[in-house]
């Protein structure tokens, strides 16, 4: 089995910075794309940024130039550096790992997508 655990959320003033981290743990052989999603009350979860295993990135237009996604494949970790935070940035940020190849307890290999539990980001004005 694989698990994703996020960290780094919290309360920050507008204009401030936060760095989110997401560690994928378990008997993992490989991970394809990793990404960060944001969800606010009453809205669907939306993609903020994603990064391929080769390092190609895609950032939502609203965060370009302020947020940067990166990953450390050796550590199965993805980061989201958030700068110049705005009042419209808050929400629960979820990490997602696509096409994770892992060994389950039964000894067989599986491929599946996984989500983290989410970390709250709050921006005060």
Image (cartoon, helix red, strand yellow):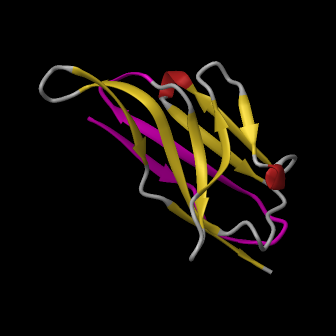
120 on left or right of 68: left
When asked about the image quadrant of residue 13, the answer is: bottom right
Q: Residue at x 64, y 18 (%)?
A: 54
In depth, the one of 89 and 99 nearer the eye is 99
Residue 33 in the image, given as x and y percentages of width and height: 56, 30
Q: Residue at x 31, y 25 (%)?
A: 102
Which stretch appears magenta? 1-30
Residue 107 in the image, given as x and y percentages of width and height: 15, 20
> Magenta stretch containing residue 13, yes or no?
yes
In depth, the one of 104 and 22 nearer the eye is 104
Residue 16 in the image, given as x and y percentages of width and height: 80, 64
Image quarter where the C terminus lies is bottom right
Q: Is residue 28 above or below residue 82?
A: above
Q: Residue at x 52, y 61 (%)?
A: 119
Q: Is residue 87 above or below residue 39?
A: below
Magenta: main secondary structure equals strand
């Amino acid at each position: 089995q694989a698990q994703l655990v996020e960290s780094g959320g919290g309360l920050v003033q507008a204009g401030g910075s936060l760095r989110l981290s997401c560690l994928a743990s378990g008997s993992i052989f490989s991970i394809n794309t990793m990404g960060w999603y944001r969800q606010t009350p009453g809205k669907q979860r939306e993609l903020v940024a994603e990064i391929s295993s080769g390092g190609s990135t895609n950032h939502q237009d609203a965060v370009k130039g302020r947020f940067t996604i990166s990953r450390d494949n050796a550590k199965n970790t993805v980061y989201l550096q958030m700068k110049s935070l705005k009042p419209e940035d808050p929400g629960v940020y979820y990490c997602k790992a696509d096409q994770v190849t892992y060994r389950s307890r039964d000894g067989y290999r599986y491929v599946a997508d996984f989500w983290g539990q989410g970390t709250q980001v709050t921006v005060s004005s």
